[in-house]
Image (cartoon, rainbow, N blue to C red):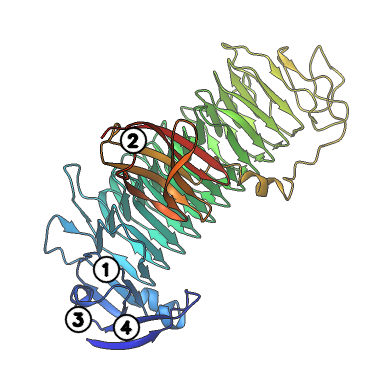
């Protein structure tokens, strides 16, 4: 083991860091170096294979291949880590537990053959990387052929305290498997960012072949989800989360008979922008947007060449009270057993506008190929409908509802063909009288998403943080405050009396989730107070009772 003390220049950083560089070669121990290293040190792994499970004890370390020094990607595939399997309950490659301080990094490595680490009764989790109440970043890491009950590749859990954080950049997850949920990735009660990642050929026997994300702040950006399989969802399950999903590519994913191949988005607050959903690998639905607590922002997405032709129908399904905007999207060449390239179920009330529907088809001519409703009225405007097979827009015959489809372009200036209301129309066909189509547009509208639309939509995310909990309440000395997500420099957490006067500043500045502790001043009087958390884009308050 060679130790070099001095300036280490890490090319991904914008500054030089005074640290110790530990040179490790195959046959030497990564764990031994990690145990001896100081906070902020870097452990440099030279090309070769390493067989051990590394468990961290609190120091912030960077562990990486020679890619750190020269950016040569050949080092990534040549620096391979497998767990040693010496402890049956600890078979991940890396284990982070209670490492709440940011600064833990894995860079330019290949992790393979992991079987997860067990920290509770539910089974092993995190085949390659196990993160419990810790903050870790992975950059240019390849995770392949790993397995666990939860999170075949990576598992991140904040255990209700929101003090876990994982930033995953330029990583590959391939051929990972979960017995239950999250073939490649599993995250709950944390902050997670997936940037420019590739999730290929991962599976989950329960659900979410690619990733399951729950009760967390989650950004998924410029990420490919391809050829993944899961029982309920082949690709991603986004459940009770907030953040953003943008510029992602979903292709050839598949699910169980009644599942969704690409995305299940339920009770979440995040715009879905400029994503592509194409060629789903099974004859089931592609995307589900469900429940209406938060308005939808499904903007500028492309759904092309999908099919749901066996037991269920619909390419994009809006259900259980979904509301908000589906806009600037393209629906093309989608085939469904009973119609519905876009299928709306009761009691959802979306607005569908500035979309283009082209060459979609229903195998059953009773059902509308482009837009289908099951008992719920809603509005369509400024859309283009052309070239569909059979009826274009309509309702399920057993659940009629009025669809306001005025001010759309139907493929021809003469409007849609309707056998009694517009028999001279040469556009797409309408067969039901409850579809209001007059007046129509005689020229196609511009369905291109405005260049500033997505830029406006991102600040509209309710916030990047939330005040998740305050306990105990009442308190008699110290109160613990849980912040979910991350804050920026303009964040302040203050204590106010009933007159609104500020009596103390608990925290000011950037914060990456976690728990703050406030001890009352000896001069603070018994009574009712308000915690006020504020930033430029959000303000939240909680009433607290202080009892001496």
* Above or below for 40 versus 378: below
Q: CA distance from mark 1 to mark 2?
A: 40 Å
What residue did someone put label 1 on? 59
Q: Nearer the observer, disc 4 or disc 1?
A: 1
Q: CA distance from mark 2 to mark 3?
A: 60 Å
Q: Locate the N terminus by quadrant.
A: bottom left
Mark 3 Cα shell of 10 Å, populated few (<14), some (14-19), many (≥20): some
Which numbered marker is on residue 21? 4
Mark 1 in CB contact with mark 2 (< 8 angstroms): no
Mark 1 Cα shell of 10 Å, populated few (<14), some (14-19), many (≥20): some
What residue did someone put label 2 on? 525
Can residue 253 be spotted in the picture? no
Q: Position of residue 463 (x, y in %)?
A: 52, 43
- Sooner in the amino-acid sequence: mark 2 or mark 3: 3
Q: Nearer the observer, disc 2 or disc 3?
A: 2
State the residue at coordinates (39%, 62%).
137
Q: CA distance from mark 4 to mark 3?
A: 15 Å
* Tag 1 secondary structure: loop
* Above or below for 34 versus 185: below
* Above or below for 265 versus 451: above
* Tag 2 secondary structure: loop
Q: CA distance from mark 4 to mark 1?
A: 14 Å
Mark 4 Cα shell of 10 Å, populated few (<14), some (14-19), many (≥20): many
Mark 4 in CB contact with mark 3 (< 8 angstroms): no
Q: Nearer the observer, disc 4 or disc 3?
A: 4
Q: Nearer the viewer, residue 389 or 454?
A: 454
* Tag 4 secondary structure: strand
- Sooner in the amino-acid sequence: mark 4 or mark 3: 4
- Sooner in the amino-acid sequence: mark 1 or mark 3: 3
* Tag 3 secondary structure: loop
Mark 2 Cα shell of 10 Å, populated few (<14), some (14-19), many (≥20): few
Which numbered marker is on residue 28? 3
């Amino acid at each position: 083991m060679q130790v070099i003390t001095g300036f280490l220049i890490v090319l991904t950083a914008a500054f030089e860091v005074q640290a110790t560089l530990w040179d490790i070669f195959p046959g030497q121990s990564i764990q031994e170096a990690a145990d001896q290293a100081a906070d902020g040190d870097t452990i440099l792994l030279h090309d070769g294979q390493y067989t051990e499970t590394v468990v961290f004890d609190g120091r912030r370390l960077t562990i990486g291949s020679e890619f750190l020094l020269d950016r040569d990607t050949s080092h990534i595939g040549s620096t391979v880590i497998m767990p040693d399997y010496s402890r049956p309950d600890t078979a991940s490659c890396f284990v982070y537990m209670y490492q709440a301080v940011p600064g833990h990094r894995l860079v330019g490595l290949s992790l393979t053959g992991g079987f997860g680490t067990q920290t509770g009764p539910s089974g092993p989790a995190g085949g390659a990387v196990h993160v419990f109440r810790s903050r870790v970043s992975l950059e240019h890491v390849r995770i392949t052929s790993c397995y666990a009950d939860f999170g075949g590749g990576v598992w991140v859990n904040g255990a209700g305290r929101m003090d876990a954080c994982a930033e995953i950049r330029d990583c590959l997850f391939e051929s990972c498997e979960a017995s239950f949920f999250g073939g490649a990735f599993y995250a709950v009660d944390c902050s997670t960012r997936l940037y420019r990642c590739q999730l290929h050929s991962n599976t989950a026997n329960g659900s979410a072949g690619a990733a399951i994300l729950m009760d967390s702040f989650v950004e998924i950006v410029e990420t490919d989800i391809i050829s993944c399989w899961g029982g309920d969802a082949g690709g991603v399950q986004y459940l009770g989360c907030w953040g953003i999903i943008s510029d992602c590519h979903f292709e050839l994913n598949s699910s169980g008979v009644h599942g969704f191949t690409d995305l299940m988005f339920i009770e979440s607050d995040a715009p879905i922008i400029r994503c592509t959903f194409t060629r789903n690998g099974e004859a089931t639905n592609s995307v589900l947007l469900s429940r209406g607590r938060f308005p939808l922002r499904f903007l500028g997405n492309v759904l092309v060449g999908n099919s749901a032709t066996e037991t269920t129908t619909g390419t994009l399904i809006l259900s259980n009270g979904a509301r908000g905007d589906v806009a600037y999207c393209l629906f093309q060449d989608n085939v469904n057993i009973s119609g519905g390239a876009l299928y709306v179920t009761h009691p959802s009330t979306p607005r569908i506008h500035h979309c283009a529907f082209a060459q979609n088809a229903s195998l059953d001519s009773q059902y509308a190929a482009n837009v289908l409703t099951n008992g719920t009225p809603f509005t369509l405007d400024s859309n283009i409908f052309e070239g569909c097979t059979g009826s274009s827009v309509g309702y399920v015959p057993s659940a009629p509802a009025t669809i306001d489809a005025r001010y759309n372009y139907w493929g021809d200036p003469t409007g849609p063909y309707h056998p009694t209301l517009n028999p001279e129309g040469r556009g797409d066909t309408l067969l039901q009288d409850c579809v209001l189509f007059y007046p129509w547009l005689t020229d196609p509208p511009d369905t291109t998403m405005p260049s500033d639309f997505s830029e406006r939509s991102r600040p509209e995310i309710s916030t990047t943080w939330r005040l998740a909990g305050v306990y105990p309440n009442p308190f008699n000395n110290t109160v613990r405050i849980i912040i979910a997500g991350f804050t920026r420099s303009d964040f302040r957490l203050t204590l106010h009396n009933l007159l609104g006067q500020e009596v103390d500043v608990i925290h000011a500045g950037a914060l990456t989730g976690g728990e703050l502790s406030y001890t009352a001043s000896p001069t603070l009087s018994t009574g009712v107070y308000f915690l006020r958390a504020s930033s430029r884009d959000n303000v939240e308050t909680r009433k607290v009772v202080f009892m001496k």
